[in-house]
Image (tube, grey):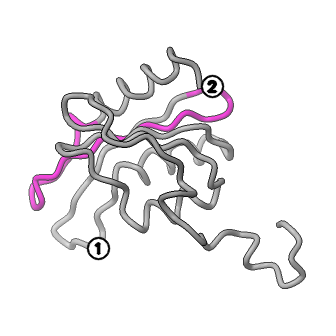
């Protein structure tokens, strides 16, 4: 990831955060993904009175990207008040597309709290390869 891509990724995540709909938790999250194609996809969290129907910012961005044909990703940025990490569901959804994803966790001022990988955030991940009984990739 180039410095320009990194800055764009962070800016997109910060901008997406302003659209968060979080009347219950008041925890506004913005996320952005950089696809291997060079395109950026962003998303915010959208809560619902039926809590289980809510969707996180990371999954919003991922669903947007996948629905437009993307399958390979280079990096993700997640912006919260305190630099919070993606939840387990988001980690699992992202793991479907590769564990080497760079993950930038930033606070609301845009300061990097952690620069890591999905592999580090989700050790011993359950991936598509685990579904194959013969050990071959899908």
Percent coordinates x, y for residue 128 in the rendering: 71, 69
x and y, in percent, of residue 125 in the image: 59, 70
Name the quadrant containing residue 79. top left
In the image, farthest residue toward the top: 4
Tag 2 secondary structure? loop
* Up-down relation of residue 49 to residue 64 (above or below): below
- Does label 1 or label 2 sit earlier along the sequence? 2
**Left or right, residue 97 beside residue 24:** right
- Residue closest to the far bottom: 133
Q: Residue 24: within the magenta?
A: yes
Quarter of the rendering occupied by the N terminus: top right
Q: Secondary structure at mark 1?
A: helix
Q: Please state which of residues 54 and 92 is positioned toward the viewer in this rendering.
A: 92
Magenta-tinted stretch:
17-39
- Residue in the foreground of this view, choosing between 131 and 68: 131
- The residue drawn where x is 27% and y is 30% is 111
Would you say residue 97 sits in the magenta stretch?
no
User: For the residues carrying marks 1 and 2, which lies nearer the camera in this image?
Assistant: 2
Tell me the residue that label 2 is attached to. Answer: 38
Q: Determine whether, in the image, residue 116 is placed left or right of residue 50.
A: right
Overall secondary structure of the magenta section: loop
Q: Give the image location of residue 78, x and y in percent.
A: 36, 42
**Circle 1 is placed at which residue position?**
52
The residue under the point 31% across, 44% down is 44
Q: What distance separates the C-alpha of mark 1 from that of mark 2?
A: 32 Å
Residue 19 location, quadrant: top left
Compared to residue 10, the image places residue 47 above or below, namely below
């Amino acid at each position: 990831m180039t410095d320009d891509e990194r800055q764009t990724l962070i800016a997109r995540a910060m901008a997406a955060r302003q659209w968060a709909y979080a009347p219950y938790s008041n925890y506004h999250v913005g996320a952005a993904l950089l696809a291997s194609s060079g395109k950026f996809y962003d998303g915010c969290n959208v809560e619902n009175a039926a809590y289980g129907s809510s969707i996180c910012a990371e999954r919003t961005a991922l669903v947007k990207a996948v629905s437009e044909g993307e399958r390979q990703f280079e990096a993700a940025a997640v912006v919260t008040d305190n630099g919070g990490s993606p939840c387990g569901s988001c980690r699992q959804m992202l793991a479907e597309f590769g564990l080497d994803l760079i993950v930038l966790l930033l606070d609301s001022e845009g300061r990097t709290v952690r620069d890591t990988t999905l592999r580090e955030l989700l050790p011993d991940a359950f991936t598509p390869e685990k579904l194959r009984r013969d050990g071959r990739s899908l």
